[in-house]
Amino acid sequence: LMLVYREHIKQISDLVGKEYAKGTLKRFKSAFNSLEEFMKHTKKDDIKLRDLNYQFITEYEFFLKTVRNVEHNTAMGTIKKLKKIVRICVAHDWLDKDPFMNYKVKIRDTNRPYLLQDELDRIIALKFTSDRLANVRDIFVFCCYTGLAYADVQKLKRVDIVIGHDGEKWIHTERVKTETSTRVPLLP
């Protein structure tokens, strides 16, 4: 299992910037490290593919939630990555049966509150002694007002600011995650 997982991470690494984002590689490496820690916890270095079963998956989930102390959705995201590795094994006929057949990855709905204008105003008004923290705040506020993700803002260049049909300045860029074109008006 670990051999297949390592090979998949190498393939992702080779395709960063082509088919995968750096963040995808980082998340797969993190999930691999969790699995490696689980294997050590069970006093094994690896597991034969034929020994992968439902019990292994549920024990891994339990390990993530107890020993690693991660929240449910984080555990499910980590297990999803293992499921992808298992699918690769099934597709190559290295596994006769999918051990995830009776296992359901269930993501729980979360309540993500949004900032109210007065809360955002208080963040804007914060004074920092560190230029770095002030810069982080400014980027965060910019993301809030434009709706752009940090990855989108990180790659912005001056050429992405164009004059629109209305004669005003607009950000015209391609979103990192979806690779879709987006236009955002620049407000004062």
Image (cartoon, rainbow, N blue to C red):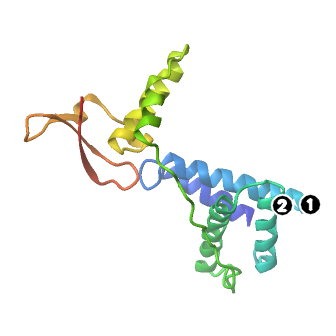
The answer to whether residue 48 is visible is no
Amino acid marked by disc 2: Met
- In the picture as drawn, the residue positioned furthest to the top comes out as 129
The amino acid sitting under disc 1 is Lys
* Residue at mark 1: 43
For mark 2, does the 10 Å Cα neighbourhood hold few (<14), some (14 to 19), or many (20 or more) residues?
Answer: some
Q: In this picture, is 43 found above or below 173?
A: below
Q: In which quarter of the image is residue 2?
A: bottom right
Q: Residue 153, image x and y in percent?
A: 38, 37
Regarding mark 2 in the picture, which secondary structure is present there? helix
* Left or right for 114, reference 46: left
CB atoms of marks 2 and 1 within 8 Å: no
Q: Tell me the residue at 41%/34% (across/down).
A: 141
Give the left or right position of residue 134, taking residue 148 as reference: right
Q: Which quarter of the rendered picture does the C terminus lie within?
A: top left
| Label ID, residue 149 | none
Q: In the image, what residue occupies the spot 89% across and 63% down?
A: 42
Residue situated in front as seen by the camera: 116 or 75 = 116
**Badge 2 is on which residue?**
39
Q: Residues within 10 Å of mark 1 (few under 14, many from 20)?
A: few
